[in-house]
Image (cartoon, helix red, strand yellow):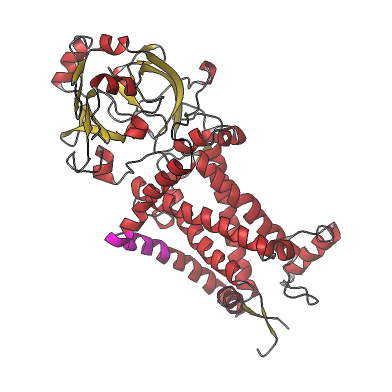
Amino acid sequence: MGATAIRRHRLATRLWHWLNAVAVFVLIGSGLGISNAHPRLYWGRYGANFDDAWAQLPRFPAWLTIPASYNLAISRRWHLFFALVLAFSLLGYLIVSLLNRHIQRDLRLRRRDLAPAHIAADVRAHLDLRFHDPEAPGEYNVLQKLSYVAVIFVLLPLVILTGLALSPGMDAAWPWLLDVFGGRQSARSLHFLAMAGLALFTVVHLTLVILAGVGNELRSMITGWWRVPE
Amino acid sequence: MMWRRRQLLARGAAGGSALLLGACDRVVQQPEVRTILFKGEDIHRGLQRALFDRDALAPEFRPEQMSPRFRTNGTRDPGTDAYAALRAGRFADWRLAVDGLVARPLALSLSELGAFPQRAQITRHDCVEGWSAIGKWQGPRLADVLRAAVLSDRARYLVFTCADYYGGAPYYESIDLVDAFHPQTILAWAMNDRFLDVGHGAPLRLRVERQLGYKQAKYLMRVTAVESLAGVGKGRGGYWEDNVDYDWWAGI
């Protein structure tokens, strides 16, 4: 301890991080509960028991679902409420982060970031459990940037828009949603795949938080203050 | 040593997650939490109604885009003596009652319903469970039937009473006037260019195309205009809404 501490995360970033974490947690749990009602995935506009499914999902166990015992109505209540939290907190975060230049400064991928040699060096650094550039410890490394960009600009918008495409009301309001995703059952499949991507990110993210030091990382996301590793 | 700590942390994370999931189940027992959570339905309905065209049409499809086989769901056959008698007579004696807050109560036969201007539409049926099927429906617009019955200004909801029984009472559903007067809301007597079969709700079912399958009431016997849903069933506007907490507005 006693090393230099820096202000790592802005208030808007921290606030959104925790709102989003809660929303993703509830949405995955309740979503797996909803999946148990009809655990088959299809491509195209329609899909039911007599149609060909590309995936037959397992029955998700009680310890993964909200609620634990199968209840489609209550799973849907959780899911549809926290869908609003997920979508509107992301919208707010994106607007604030454009204004305070968090996106332009911290998340923008530069050409030198993406040079193969630079990415390879960062992969080696990760394998050595070195996550911070000693020259600029406050910056995200390139693998971090790539994964955050994938979550914020690809997976979360995808999971929100495919979710909207499942609403028969939204399909009337925004029929282009169905054109973009190739039909409601395709949107449902993509919704599931985007969820799987977010779940994978969460597992890797939590693992790296543990490897990088839970106390320091957790404090920086709560108070903003982060101790620079020696 | 370090590794054991990590294992413990990983186990802690898994255990913590199970605790949080359990906490969700406990917290939802609180009436206050339930009230907030159940507000999601009103927020979604409010947003969709405020931001988008209330008469926006559900997507319609071409004949080659229809499901090869449209599965049945819910009641496959009401199985009562009264229904069996109507069915044996090929529904010649069946009448749809249109009553409640109307100036001219009606009792419409199938041929009278067929005399209204007809609308045919190939639309997608979305079950709350997640599956979808595309089929063709035909019948008069509910709006035209309500105009013929001269709906009162006090009417706010339409309640649909069915011939099939759930838990000792007839299945019922309800919609508000925005959906009742929507151009695609029809009383369908034909499906895929044939008379409705028993599995799909013969002789008549509701199609309210911007909502989920459980709103598409089958085996219709009666349409009642009411001012409030409070006195109907257990007051929440439908069999599933009353008994298992399904959303009354099933547009999402």
Asked if residue A125 lies in the magenta stretch, the reply is: no
Examine the residues drawn in magenta and state their main secondary structure: helix
Q: Residue at x 43, y 51 (%)?
A: A79
Where the C terminus of chain A falls, by quadrant? bottom right
Give A229 or B122, whichever is nearer the viewer: B122
Decide: is A147 above or below B58: below
Count of labels in the image? 0
Q: Residue at x 46, y 39 (%)?
A: A167
Percent position of residue B148, x then y:
26, 18
- Quick check: can you spot residue A68? no
- Quick check: can you spot residue B155? yes
Give B148 or B208, whichever is nearer the viewer: B148
Q: Is residue B114 left or right of residue A225?
A: left
Q: Is residue A20 left or right of residue B244?
A: right
Decide: is B145 above or below B244: above
- Magenta-highlighted residues: B20-33
Percent position of residue B229, x then y:
22, 40
Q: Residue at x 28, y 40 (%)?
A: B240
Give B183 or A122, whichever is nearer the viewer: B183
Percent position of residue A15, x then y:
54, 68
